[in-house]
Amino acid sequence: MTTFLLSILLLFTIFAAFAFGVAMGYWVICGVLNLFHPNRTLKKPSSAPALAPTVGGD
């Protein structure tokens, strides 16, 4: 029984390490792509705040 539990634990560890590696690789690739994205450094024009017209008849 101990051998069975240890083999299951080893298999789970291998799968967990694989899933962690895939997730970290995805995170790193997304970070690098975001770092070199051309729109990251461009200044976006700010739009004027849209104000509702009010009646100033005091």
Image: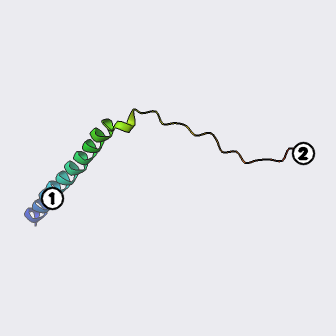
* SS for dot 2: loop
Distance, label 2 to label 1, CA atoms, is 77 Å
Question: Percent position (x, y) of residue 14?
Answer: 14, 55
Amino acid identity at mark 2: Gly
Q: Which residue is mark 2?
A: 57
Question: Is 36 on the left or on the right of 55, as rendered?
Answer: left
Using residue 15 as the reference point, say whether residue 58 is left or right of it: right
Identify the amino acid type marked 1: Leu
2 lies left or right of 24? left
Check the picture and name the quadrant holding the N terminus. bottom left
Q: What residue sits 62% from the left and 39% below the top? A: 48
Q: Position of residue 28 (x, y in %)?
A: 26, 42
Q: Residue at x 39, y 36 (%)?
A: 40
- Marks 2 and 1 in Cβ contact (< 8 Å): no
* Image colouring: rainbow
The reply, left or right, for residue 12 in relation to residue 46 is: left
> What SS does tag 1 mark?
helix
Up-down: is 11 above or below 49? Answer: below
Q: Which residue is nearer to you in this view: 10 or 18?
A: 18
Foreground tag (2 vs 1): 2
Sort mark 2 into few (<14), some (14-19) or many (20+) by Cα contacts within 10 Å: few
State the image coordinates of residue 15 (x, y, percent, origin top left): 17, 57
What residue does disc 1 label? 9
Name the residue: 12% across, 56% down. Answer: 10
Q: Is residue 33 above or below residue 43?
A: below
Of all residues, the one furthest to the bottom in this rendering is 1
Q: Quadrant of the C terminus?
A: top right
- The residue lying at 34 percent from left, 37 percent from top is 38
